[in-house]
Image (cartoon, rainbow, N blue to C red):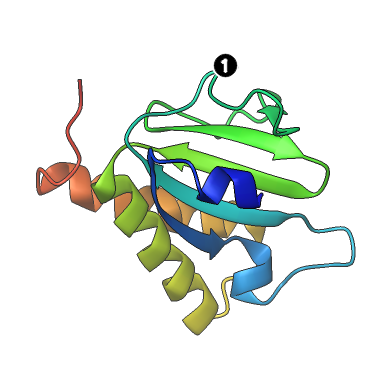
Amino acid sequence: MEEIIKMSWVKMLAPFGSRVVGCATDTSDYDYLVLADYRPDLVSLAYTGFEPDTSDPLYGVYFSSWRNGNVNLVFTDSKGFFDATVEATEFCRKYKVYDKTDRCRVHEAFRAHLEQTDKIFVF
């Protein structure tokens, strides 16, 4: 993962998900949110070992997910999306929102608020 952090188009990285919230199991993966100048394609991540994770329907227009073993990188080029995800993760940690479906709903609510306040731009 160090090679990704050092890429010039990567701006910020923040852990999120069950490990940060406090509800991880032994099989939980490590989730990292990556703010970048653009969302990567296969060429951008060539030789890093990360491949697109397209099996989960929760991935949407603002982000793409890449996996290598038990590490999941979620790339976004939206600062609003990045901030909303970090804030939603902190909310879930603080208020012990452990159920995955409930955590996803919290994240959706934080993102919807940002869309309404024009901090996330819909294309």
**Residue 112 in picture, x, y percent from top left:** 27, 46
Q: Label 1, on which residue?
A: 43
Location of residue 82 with respect to 64 vertically, above or below: below
Q: What x and y, as percent, mark residue 82? A: 35, 51
Q: Name the amino acid type tagged 1.
A: Val
Q: Residue 34, image x and y in percent? A: 46, 48
Q: Quadrant of residue 24?
A: bottom right
Quadrant assignment for the C terminus: top left
Name the residue rendered at 65%, 23% in the picture.
Answer: 46
Q: Residue at x 50, y 51 (%)?
A: 33
- The residue drawn where x is 57% and y is 16% is 43
* Above/below status of 108 relative to 14: above
In terms of image quadrants, where is residue 122?
top left
Residue occupying the far left of the picture: 118
* Res 115 seen here: yes
Is 41 positioned to the left or the right of 106 in the image?
Answer: right
Question: In the rendered view, does 71 fall on the left or right side of 96?
Answer: right
How many marks can you see? 1
Q: Residue at x 60, y 27 (%)?
A: 45
Crowding at mark 1 (Cα within 10 Å: few <14, some 14-19, many 20+)? few
Callout 1: helix, strand or loop? loop
- In the image, residue 48 above or below residue 23: above
Q: Which residue is at the far bottom?
A: 94
Q: Is residue 113 left or right of residue 54?
A: left
Quarter of the image for residue 118 reads top left
Residue 95 seen in the current view: no
Q: Position of residue 21 (x, y in %)?
A: 60, 73
The residue nearer to you, when weighing 62 against 104, is: 62
